[in-house]
Image (cartoon, rainbow, N blue to C red):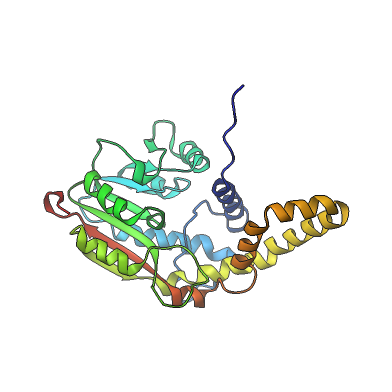
Amino acid sequence: MSKHKPVQYKDVGLEIALVFARYFFHSEYLHYGYWQEGVAVEPSNLLQAQEKYCELLLAHIPPGTKTILDVGCGTGRFSQELIKRGYSVDCVSPSALLTLQTRNRLGAEQVIFECRYEDLETERRYDLILFSESFQYVPLDRAFQNSLKFLNDNGHLLISDFFDTDLEEISPLGGGHSLKAFNEGVIRYQYTVLQNVDITAETAPNLDLVNGLVHAVAIPIYRSITNALRQNHPSFFRGITWVYRKRLAKLRRKYVGNARSSASFARFKSYRVLLCQRPPNGVG
């Protein structure tokens, strides 16, 4: 009798995020929007802001680039755009759910490495390796080391992600490598930073958008369900809340209240678009 693999909570979260993105925002992008002045921060404008983000990434791809490795490709929506523009694109997708979405979008012949970037093994080499909000999930040293192996001579890393600003205060927001540690890694592995664009102000509004959606939709639904369980199945409710008390407490700290706001993001995080060139002869 075969055993089913346990469902990963991360995949559940991704599936919920995708459902929300499709229904509320009419989008299959899972990345932040790039909010320009004059565009109201509201759900109806998120797709527009996400498309502006894609335009920003495209503008940072160096001339002469032909082959791209898209690390953490999401649903494959941006990979699809790259392919339309004539680039040869391979994908890295550690999520089974998102791998399925990408294959359905790009076709069965699409090269998708179904693993984490730090576990990737391939003889293929690329002109550019793209990390669009995926860099923070890869250990820093492994990100730099693997990229040395997989980049062609004079190849580039294009990183678009947020970093921790290393304040002494405890941040209410998780995620992101230390910006100081990143800069130290660049020096240690001898990459050259060609472009370093701070887009924190243009991405911070995403936190207000998500916070508004959570308070307007997710929390009322959660409270309705828990109230019904508490009234109709009190023993079951007490048991389940005890078993998952730590996870529920973490979710409450993360989403209840207004700690996840554009103001706190701008204070504790720094969102950067970074174009880095591989050191000559792969030294590092």
Residue 137 drawn at (x, y percent): 41, 54
Query: Residue at the spot x=37%, y=48% of the render?
Result: 71
Query: Residue at the spot x=68%, y=61% of the render?
Result: 218
Query: Residue at the spot x=28%, y=68% of the render?
Result: 196
In the image: residue 47, left or right of residue 244: left
Viewer can see residue 192: no
To which quarter of the image does residue 63 belong? bottom left
Image quadrant in which the N terminus is located: top right
Residue 17 drawn at (x, y percent): 57, 53
Image quadrant in which the C terminus is located: bottom left
Compared with 165, 66 (above or below) is above
To which quarter of the image does residue 5 belong? top right
Viewer can see residue 152: yes
Q: Residue furthest left?
A: 281
In the image: residue 212, left or right of residue 69: right
Compared with 196, 159 (above or below) is above
Q: Residue furthest top?
A: 1
In the image: residue 89, left or right of residue 217: left
Residue 181 drawn at (x, y percent): 31, 65
Residue 224 drawn at (x, y percent): 79, 59
Query: Residue at the spot x=74%, y=51% of the render?
Result: 240
To which quarter of the image does residue 217 belong? bottom right
Q: Nearer the viewer, residue 266 or 3?
A: 3
